[in-house]
Amino acid sequence: MLVVSGGSNVQGPEELREIKEKSGRREETTLKSRLDARPERKPEFTTTSGFQVNRLYTPTDVSDLDYSEDLGYPGQFPYTRGIHPTMYRGRLWTMREFSGFGTAEETNRRFKYLLAEGETGLSVAFDYPTITGYDSDHHFAQGEVGRCGVAVSSLADMETLFGGIPLDKVSTSMTINGPAAMLLAMYIAVAQKQGMAPELLSGTTQNDMLKEFFAQKLCIFPPKPSVKLVVDIIEYCAKKLPKWNPISISGYHIREAGANAVQELAFTLADGLAYVQATVDRGLDVDEFAPRLSFFFAAHNDLFEEVAKFRAARKIWAQFMRERFKARNSRSMWMRMHVQTSGCTLTAQQPANNIIRVAIQALAAVLGGTQSLHTNSFDEALALPSEEAVRIALRTQQIIAHESGASNTIDPLGGSFYLESLTRQMEEEALKYIDRIEAMGGIFQAIEKGFLQKEIANSAYKYQLEIEKKESIIVGLNEYAGDETGKIPLLRVDPHVEDVQLRSLRRLRERRNRDLVTRTLDKLRQAADKDHNLMPHILKCVKAYSTLGEICGVLQEVYGQYQELVMF
Amino acid sequence: MRVERKIRALVAKPGLNSHDRGAKVVARALRDAGMEVIYTGLRQTSEQIVETAMQEDVDVLCLSILSGAHMTLLPRIMNLMKEKDLNDVLVIAGGIVPEEDIPMLKQIGIAEVFGPGTPTDVTVNYVRNNLKRKL
C-alpha cells in the first residue's frame, strides 16, 4: 500500500529522502551506462493527450497525496475510487449497445435481439432528421431517413419502436438533445398506453445542449432557450419521473470532435456546472435534482490516461457539488457515468484490429469504474454495425466482466505510482481550463467567443499531424499497413425505408384529429411566450399526434434558429 | 516570371450530418498547403453549396459526408454544378462511403472519394495535380 489515511504517508520523510537519493544515484550510474549503450526508442514519451510520461514512477511522485482526502474509500467522498461501496462485486455495469436504423419496426427487432443476447439496457440511435427536429417528409430529410438511426416523427413511430417491450422492465437511453423534450414526452405517452405509471420509467435522455454548440453541433434553437428546455426536463423529471436521468452530460462528443482527454474532462465538467447553476437559479434545491444527473465519457486508446480521467472526473465533480453548490445528499456528489469506446480510433483499414482496440478501451472504462458501457463494433469506420459485429462488441464486455478478473476488486489500479500521478495531473489541468472558462464569464461566453471550438479544432489537427508524421503509430494505418484480408460483410440500410416512412407519416397526418393538433400547438406557443415549463404542454402535443417537426417549428417561431459560428 | 495565384478551395458539409472533424482538418491542411480555403459550416443545402462555389469562384469543391446520404445529396449537387456551368471545378468527396458506391459517384463527375484514414497530404497533392482550371 502506498499511503495511509490521516494525511501521513507510509513512507515517512526519511524514507522518501532515501528513495530520492537512490533514484538519483541510479540515474547517474546504472541507467546512464545503459542509456549510453542503448538509447531509448524516443527522446520523449507522452500520453495521447501530450502529458510527458516518466521512465519510472516511485513514491516520490505521489508524496503529497493524502489517502483520505484524495482517494478515500469507494462509496465515500470524494469518490475517486468509485461511487459504490462494493462496485462490480455487487453488480456489474450495465451493458448497453447503442442501436437504431431504418424504420421503427426494424429497430424494434434489433432491440428484441439484443435483449435476448443478454443486453441489460436499450439505447436508441435516432436518424439525422429526428435529432435535428425535422419530420421525415421535410425536404432537408431527403436521403437521411433511417440512415444513421431510426426515424421517429411522431408518437405513432415511438409506439412501434417499443411495441412488445415492457417499459417497466428495461431502462432506455435516448441519444437526443434538441428535441429531447419531445422524445421523452413520446416515451411517457407510450408507457401510459401500455398501462404503466410514468414514475416507474427508468432511463436517460442525453439532453445536453451545451456540448452541441461546440462539439456535436446538432442545434435547433440558440443557446439560451436550448438550456431553458434542458432545465425544463430536469425540473419535470425531479417532480414526475424519479427514476429517470434527465440529462447525460457528455464528454464523448467533445472527444470525438477532436479534444484531448483533459479538454474532454474540463469542458464536460464546465457544462455540468452550468446546468446545475441554471437549475438552482430556477429555484430547485440542489439535492432535489443533482442525484439524477449522469455523465457520459469516451474511452480512447491510452489505457492509463483514460483510467486517470474517470477517477479525476469523479473527484472534481464531488468537490464542486459539495463546496460550490452545498449539496448535502451524497448522491448529489456522485458522478454516475456511461462510457463508450472511442469511435474516432476505429480504422477502416484492417478492421478486425478494432476488436482489440475496443477491448482495451472497454477495459479502461471498467478499471475506471463506469456504471454503464457501450462497446463499438469493429466495422463502424465503414458502416453501421452488422449483427455479427455488435455481438462481438457485446461479448467483449462479457469477457472483461467474467474472464479478465478486472471486476473482482475495486479500483484495481488505485495506488499505482503512475496512475495516481496521472490522476493528479489530469485534475490540475482540468481545473485550469475550468478557471479559464469561468474567467471568460462562463460557458455561454466561451461558446460565443469560439474558444471551445478553437481548442477542439486545434487538438484534432495536432492529432492528425502526429499520425502523419508517425509520431503516433496507428497499427494497420501508418505502420504494419497493407495486408488487407478481404472484405467484411457490411450492413446496408434498405433505401426503401424512406418510402415506407413517408407513407406512414402521410397516413398519420390524414387520420389524426387536426383541431386537437392545432389547439395543443397553440397552447405550447403561449406557454413558450410566457416562459412556463414546457414539458406538460409538449406531452399534450405528442399525445395529439403532432409531429416532431411541428412542435419544433412552433418553438422556433418563439425562440429563433441557431446560427453556427463557422471556423476551422 | 508569372506568379501563380493561389488555389481556391471550398470545403462543404452537405445535408444534416454534423461530423465536421474531418472537414475542418482537411480545410486546415489545404490552407497550410498555401490554398485559399472557404468552409461553409454545417447543414448546407445543395443549392447553397453550389451557389457558394460559384460566388467564391473556387477551383476545387471538397464535399464531406458521413451520414450515408451521399447517394441522394451528391448527385443533386453535381446536377446543379452542371446547370450552373461549373464544369471546370474539380469536385472531390470524403467521409464514410461504401466502396460499391464509388463507381457511381465517379460516373457523375466526382473525381475521387477519400475514405477514413487518408493522410491530408494525399488530398493536398491530389488537388494540386488534378485541377481542371489553369492557375
Image (tube, coloured by chain):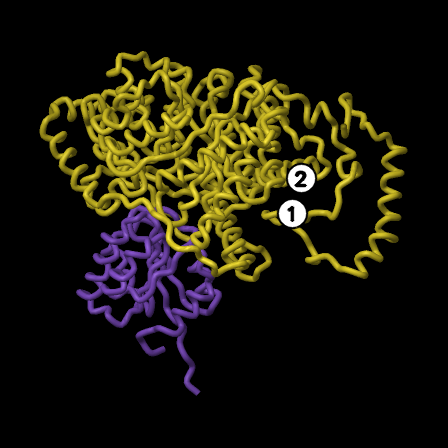
Chain colours: A yellow, B purple
Are the numbered discs 2 and 1 placed on the same chain, yes or no? yes
Extreme left residue here?
Answer: A510
Query: Looking at the rendering, in which quadrant would you find the N terminus of chain A?
Result: top right
**Secondary element type, mark 1:** loop
Q: Amino acid at mark 2?
A: Leu
Q: Is residue B45 above or below residue A325?
A: below
Residue A89 image point, x, y percent: 58, 20
- Name the residue rendered at 27%, 28% in the picture: A161
Residue A485 image point, x, y percent: 43, 55
Chain label for disc 1: A
The label shown at residue A422 is: 2
Do residues under tags 2 and 1 come within 8 Å of each other at their CB atoms? yes
Label 1 sits on residue: A51
Q: Nearer the viewer, residue A193 or A480?
A: A480
B93 left or right of A321 in image? left
Q: Nearer the viewer, residue B51 or A262?
A: A262
Q: Is residue A567 above or below residue A120?
A: below
- Name the residue rendered at 67%, 39% in the picture: A422
Q: Is residue A183 visible?
A: yes
Q: Is residue B68 above or below residue B120?
A: above
- Name the residue rendered at 33%, 52% in the picture: B65
Q: Is residue A230 visible?
A: no
Q: CA distance from mark 2 to mark 1?
A: 9 Å
Q: In the rendered structure, which disc, 2 or 1, sits on the residue that comes first in sequence?
A: 1
Q: Nearer the viewer, residue A377 or A178?
A: A377
Q: Amino acid at mark 1?
A: Phe
A311 left or right of A516 in image? right
